Image: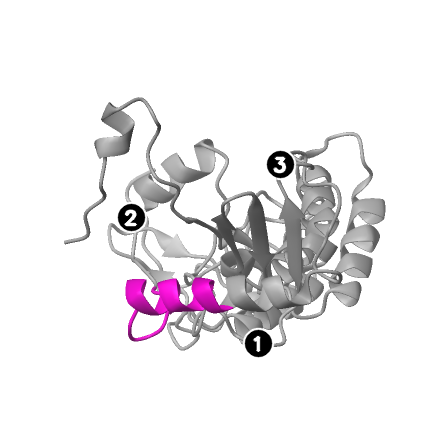
Amino acid sequence: MSCRELGSAFRGEGPPPEPLYAESLFGRLNCRWSSLRAWTAGDWKLIDGSRAELFHLAEDPGETRDRAAEEAPRVARMRADLRAAMARMAPGGDHARTAAITPEQEANLKSLGYVGGSGGGGELDEPGLPDPRDRVQFYERMQIILRAQNIPLERASAEAAAMAEADPGNPFAQTTVASLAYRAGRLSAAARAYRRSLELDPDRPPGPSWPARPAGRRACAPREVLPPWRDRASPPGPRPGGRARPDCRRSASNRRPSTRGATTSGS
C-alpha cells in the first residue's frame, strides 16, 4: 500500500508535490497509432509517444511551446521516471486485452459515441507506430464522412480511400472504406477492405454489421462478400423456425433468391 504524508496540507501549506501520470490509448486501440503517456513533475510536463514533447507549465500553461529539443537532459530524466512508474504499475508489461461484450452493451457504447475497437493486440507501447498527434485529423474527418448526409457516397468513398492509403496500418480507416463501399453497393470492395482491417487487427470483434441495405441491391450480399468468420459451407435452405436463408450465390443479377426445398412458417 502506498501512503502520502498530508501534515503540510493540514498546516495550510498544501500537499507536497508528487508526479502525475496520464495516458491516452484511444489511438492505439482503434487506429494502431502509438500510445501517449504523460508525466508531470513540478512545473514540467512530458508527453511521450513516438516522439517526446516537453512543456514548462508555469510559463506556458496552454502547452503551446515544445521545449524537448532544448531540454534534452530533462526529457531523459522524466522519461526514465515515467518508465519506472510504468514498470511498477505493470510489472509484466502493458498489454492490450480483449473483452467480450454483448450486443446490447455494444449498442449502449455506440450510443454514447464510442467506436468499435479490439484492444489493438499486443504490447501497448509497440515501437514504430505512427504518432496520433500527427494523424488525428484522419480520424476526425472519417467520423464526419461516415455520419454526414450531405456528402455524395462516391465522394466520401474516394476521400476515405485516400486517407486509408495515407495511413495504411489503420484498421479503422479500412473499416470506414468498407462501410462506405457497402452503402454505395460496391460489395466486393467492401469485402476487401473488411478483410484488410482484420489482417491489421486480428483481435477486432468478429463480423462487420452491415450498416444499411446498399443502394440498388437486395438485402443479401454475394457469397464472396461474406466475412471469413461466417460458415461458408452452410447451404441455403430452412433455418431454425422454418424460415429459408436466401441463396446469394446467384447474385450477379437481382433475380429472386432461390428457396427451393425450403419450407415457410405459414405466411
Residue 54, which numbered label?
none
Whichever of callouts 2 and 3 sits on the residue coming sooner in the sequence is 3
Of residues 61 and 112, the one drawn nearer to the viewer in this rendering: 61
Residue tagged 3: 58
Q: Is 230 situated above or below 99?
A: below
Would you say 31 lies left or right of 165 here? left
In magenta, the rendered stretch is 80-97
Q: Pointer 1: what residue?
A: 127
> 10 Å neighbourhood of mark 2: few (<14), some, or many (≥20)?
few
The relative height of residue 196 versus residue 68 in the rendered view (above or below) is below
Observer-nearest of 251 and 10: 10
Picture disc at residue 102:
2
Residue 95 location in percent, x, y?
Answer: 38, 69
Q: How many marks?
A: 3
Measure the C-alpha gap from mark 2 to mark 3. Answer: 47 Å
Q: Closer to the observer: label 2 or label 1? A: 1
250 and 20: which is toward the camera: 20
Judge left or right: residue 18 versus residue 158: left
Residue lying at 64% horizontally and 44% vertically, measured from the top left: 56
| Amino acid under disc 2 | Thr
Element type where label 1 sits in the image:
loop
x and y percent of residue 130 in the render?
67, 66
Residue that appears at 53% across and 61% down? 35
For this orientation, the residue located farthest to the left is 1
Q: Is residue 88 magenta?
A: yes
